[in-house]
Image (tube, helix red, strand yellow):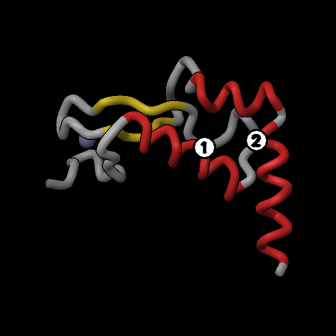
Amino acid sequence: MSCPSGKYQYLSQDLAETALIDQHIYKGFAPHEGPQNVYECQTCGHWHLTSKASERSARLQKMIDSGELKKKQEASKWERLF
Ligand SMILES: [Zn+2]
């Protein structure tokens, strides 16, 4: 079943958060850009990404704080060049 929100559905919070972080890596978002968190949809029962969260996903925040996100973004930039 697809969701009336039209958003991509993830089967678990873990998968949604992984996708959230992947988007930040591959699209090279600044921390405040792009989706910020995940939420369990009341309509379809799956998980979606949201850019309107008041709080950033703890997993994403940790990647930003540790500098790991920046490192992975740099690495993915190089991968795209070759
Ligand atoms: Zn939904």
Of 74 and 42, which appears nearest the observer? 74
Give the vertical position of 60 relative to 11 (above or below).
above
Quadrant (top left/top right/bottom left/bottom right) for the C terminus: bottom right
Helix, strand or loop under label 1 = helix
Quadrant in the rendering for residue 35: top right
Image quadrant in which you'd find residue 64: top right
SS category of the residue bearing label 2: helix
Label 2 vs 1, first from the N-terminus: 1
| Residue 69: mark | 2
Residue indicated by mark 1: 21
**Residue at 28% across, 45% down:** 5
Name the residue at the top extreme.
54
As drawn, is 50 to the left or to the right of 48?
Answer: right
Query: Label 1: few (<14), some or many (≥20) within 10 Å?
Result: many
Q: Which mark is residue 44?
A: none
* Residue type marked 1: Ile
Q: Residue at x 79, y 39 (%)?
A: 68
Q: Residue furthest bottom?
A: 82
Dot 2 and dot 1 residues touching (CB under 8 Å): yes
Locate the N terminus by quadrant.
bottom left
Q: CA distance from mark 2 to mark 1?
A: 8 Å
Q: In the rendered view, tell whether residue 74 sits above or below residue 63.
A: below
Which x, y percent locates residue 38? 44, 33
Q: Position of residue 10 (x, y in %)?
A: 34, 46
Residue 41: where, in percent of width, then height? 27, 33
Q: What amino acid is labelled 2 in the image?
A: Leu
